[in-house]
Image (cartoon, rainbow, N blue to C red):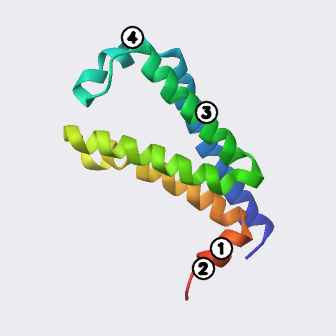
Amino acid sequence: MDTPRTLWIGRVLTGLAILFFLMDAGGKLIAPAAMIANSPPLGLPATVDFYRLLGAIALICTALYAWPRTSVLGAVLLTGYLGGAIACQLRVGSPLFSHTLFGLYIALFVWGGLWLRDARLRAIFPVIR
């Protein structure tokens, strides 16, 4: 299954996931007023420091995911990060497919891209026909 096409699809999915998380981390590091104003309904602290901490965590996890040697660790950490986002959306009763499951969609890009470009991961999680 190590065809050039499979490898490139994996790289594209990985690149899109990295781009998403860089934008997410950047937005949290900037911490615009609108983001902070919408924190209390989600049950999150309405402070700039909280969002900067989240941004730093997202940036570190993304860097680990982008580096090939630590990409599995980064994927695990990003999955946990996305799980927290899903939990927040579930708690406030957000729409299921557009808001609540959005973290799952991004996780599929993260793990799908990694699975397509890493033969070791495919050996652990094979597709059974």
| Label 2, label 3: how far apart the Cα atoms are | 30 Å
Looking at the picture, which amino acid does disc 1 mark?
Arg
* Mark 2 nearby-residue class (10 Å; few <14, some 14–19, many ≥20): few
- Mark 3 vs mark 1, foreground winner is 3
Which residue is at 67% across, 65% downward? 116
Q: Secondary structure at mark 1?
A: helix
For label 1, the residue is 122
- The circle drawn on residue 64 is none
Q: Residue 103 location in percent, x, y?
A: 42, 47
Mark 3 and mark 1 lie on one chain; the one further toward the N terminus is 3
Q: State the residue position of label 2.
A: 126
Q: Judge the density around disc 3: few (<14), some (14-19), many (≥20) Cα neighbours within 10 Å.
A: many
| 23 lies left or right of 80 | right
Q: Looking at the picture, which amino acid does disc 4 mark?
A: Ala
Identified at 31% across, 15% down, the residue is: 37
Task: Locate residue 30, reporting x and y percent.
Answer: 53, 15
Which of the two discs, 2 and 3, sits closer to the camera? 3
Q: Secondary structure at mark 3?
A: helix
